[in-house]
Amino acid sequence: MARAPRNPVSVKTTTAGEKAARSRPAVARALDRGPLPGYYGYALRIAQVAVFENFARVVGKLADRMGELTPGRFSLLTLLKANPGINQTALSRAVGLDKSTLTPALDQLERKGLILRERTPQDRRTYALRLSSAGEEYLAELTRKVEQHEKNIVAALSPAERAALIRLLKKVAKSLGSEAIE
């Protein structure tokens, strides 16, 4: 009976110089981002990530107490304070989200005891939304933190640049069909 030929296994020995080269940290090379830096969407996304990170840092323990506190949740609470009794459809338009995306956020705020949903007498399928007293207190505390966060966002901008930034961001949103912009 013939035996199958053996596959020779080569054993590579490692020299001391090769071991030393592997133990040194790799030299970071500049990352080529290709055309991304010239894309408006990319620049907006990078800015958004930085804004969200600063929000989490500044808000800190208040976010821990609430869980999943985002700038969007802050917007919801602020709109509910300013518009007690607003329905979900109007609120979804105001924040630029569809109702199916908004519902889980409202569910969370309700579970945390920050908002109240009450059936409207005119249409039993519709809820009127408002802040609870705990929501009012929480929003007051949160607003103080968010004001510091807002200062951080525009710290490097002059007053004229700040006004221009708001104007241009609104113009971009409106040109893309957002109903959430005034």
Image (spheres, rainbow, N blue to C red):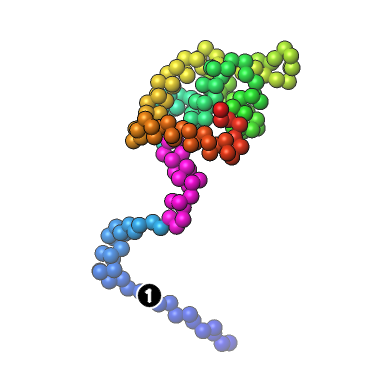
Name the image quarter holding residue 141: top left
The quadrant of the image that shows the N terminus is bottom right
Asked whether, in this view, residue 90 is left or right of residue 74, the answer is right
Can residue 55 be seen here?
no
Magenta span: helix, strand or loop, mainly? helix
Give whichever of 94, 31 is nearer the camera. Answer: 94
Name the image quarter holding residue 106: top right
The picture places residue 86, in percent across and down from the top left corner, at 62, 19
Is 41 in the magenta? Answer: yes
Badge 1 amino acid: Val
The picture places residue 44, in percent across and down from the top left corner, at 47, 42
The picture places residue 45, in percent across and down from the top left corner, at 48, 43
The quadrant of the image that shows the C terminus is top right
x 53%, y 36%: residue: 171
Tell me the element at label 1: loop
x 70%, y 20%: residue: 126
Q: Give the range drawn in magenta.
A: 33-52
Is 173 in the magenta? Answer: no
Residue at the outermost bottom position: 2
